[in-house]
Amino acid sequence: MTTFRAARGTRDLLPTETPRWSALERLADDLATRYGYRRIETPMLEQTAVFERGVGEVTDIVEKELFRIAPRSEDGESWSLRPEPTAGIVRAYVQHGMQTWPQPVKLAMTGPMFRYDRPQAGRYRQFWQFDIEAIGDAGPAIDAEIIELGTRFYAEAGLTGVEVLVNSIGDPACRPAYIAELTGWYRERGTRLPPFELERLARNPLRLLDSKDPAMVALNADAPRITDRLCDDCAQHFATVQEHLHVLGVPFRLEPGLVRGLDYYTRTAFEFYIAGREGQQQALGGGGRYDGLVELLGGRPTPGIGFGIGLDRLLIALDEQGAKPAAAIAPVAVVVGADPDDTVGRLRIATELRATGIPARAELGRRKLGKQLEAAARDQAHFAIILGDELTSGDVQVRDLQAGTQKLVPVAGLAREIARAHAAHRHGLAEQGAAGAARGPDPA
Ligand code: HAM
């Protein structure tokens, strides 16, 4: 018999893990709203050309890591699963004429991305990003605001020790001369370059700067720095970003070797790491400015900036810091009964409770009352609603499983009593609440 497994580099998020994911997604939503970013969803697949043009043909992401979907003969179009959201979001910005909206258009998205990379700890073929994009603002103030938003996300998620590395990689006015100088500099030292880097030098010389190869790290310490060769506009922009970060109290470190692995970047580039862990190619998140991307994808020249935060890596980092696992979700009430066969009676009451918004479960197994109560306690339910002989006079027993008390409550007022007693318990008024629930309907 074949055993089926999730595809290599992908994984199932089980109910034991999803509460933490939901919490991160809620935090992402909440922060995006707080900062004025509105949700966008784009398809998980795009025309391959969107990524080839947007991210860049000579990048690892497009050259090696694209999940290409074989073209179907009837349309012949080449599609790929999105390796990142920015190119698709900018495609949508152009397609839907968002240039005519009030600028900047501030967009947020959280969802899965796909890269056909060699899987290892913290590197998956399907992973999740919280992404933020502000399109139509040339900065520099918004650059700092976005970096601050990233650091706040980590802080509110409970992660400590996050460091922001910041750089400026110039623009079309100053970068070409720098790249020519850098290429010449590496060529003069060609014998010291590993063969792989020598090959990359011909195609994407900037990438050599953030090589993790120890020989390259040593060599790169003396490499010409883009930050010393920025044109006046880029230098002024970068200085102002730093000034704003200082005023906002966001600690950051200048990292002249930070070039990012996507071609669309201009000027501000940044990455988030746990301090001291930069060597391991395990950025927690990263982003930057992409002032040429809208035009590259067919729109009017429009500046933009954003970041992508890896949620998988954030959760791994939280685990390493000993973050508490999220509590399991317990039902507020479990409906049990003396007559094992009366599933209709139990289901009806649970349905009524749920209709009023109370998380409730009916015991649908036909087992003895004792076993039903044990299961309710195991579920960590607050109340067991016990259906017995009192049902003929319209009442049920409500047992507070946490306080160990039990009261008779009319079915007609059950939902209200449970809601009130549970709310009182949550607000630390357990005894009053439970007693109040037993005394009868709320006079208010
Ligand atoms: P990126 O640096 O390629 O940037 O990815 C952002 C984050 O996604 C990384 O820092 C990392 O946490 C996570 N990540 C990337 N690949 C993987 C993987 N294979 N497994 C697990 N996590 C991964 C971008 O994607 C840009 N779109 C960011 C951006 C938005 N720039 C401007 N706007």
Image (spheres, rainbow, N blue to C red):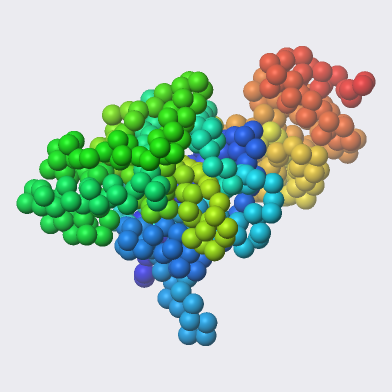
Report x, y in % for residue 376: 63, 35
Q: Quick one: quadrant of the C terminus?
A: top right
Q: Name the image quarter holding the N terminus.
A: bottom left
Q: Is residue 301 visible?
A: yes
Farthest bottom residue?
74
In the rendered image, the vertical position of residue 309 relative to residue 409, given as above or below: below
Q: Nearer the viewer, residue 80 or 240?
A: 240
For the image, the number of numbered tags is: 0
- Residue visible at 57% across and 42% down in the picture: 137
> Looking at the image, which residue is at 21% across and 43% down?
212
Above or below, comparing residue 73 to residue 21 in the picture: below
The answer to whether residue 92 of the structure is visible from this angle is no
Left or right position of 16 against 27: left
Farthest front residue in view = 232
Where residue 362 appears, as percent x and y from the top left, is: 70, 44
Q: Is residue 309 left or right of residue 382?
A: left
Quadrant of res 408: top right
Residue beneath the point at 69% across and 46% down? 102
Instruction: Out of 329 and 143, give the one closest to the viewer.
Output: 143
Q: Nearer the viewer, residue 313 or 135?
A: 135
Up-down relation of residue 160 to residue 281 (above or below): above
Which quadrant would residue 276 be assigned to in this image? top left
Q: Is 169 left, or right, of 133 in this rendering? A: left
Residue 66, given in percent of the width and then of the height, sits at: 38, 63
Where is residue 288 shown, x and y percent of the image? 44, 43
Of the pair 218 and 182, the residue shown nearer to us:
182
Q: Which residue is painted at 31% across and 39% down in the image?
A: 229
Q: In the displayed image of the protein, which residue is found farthest to the left?
A: 191
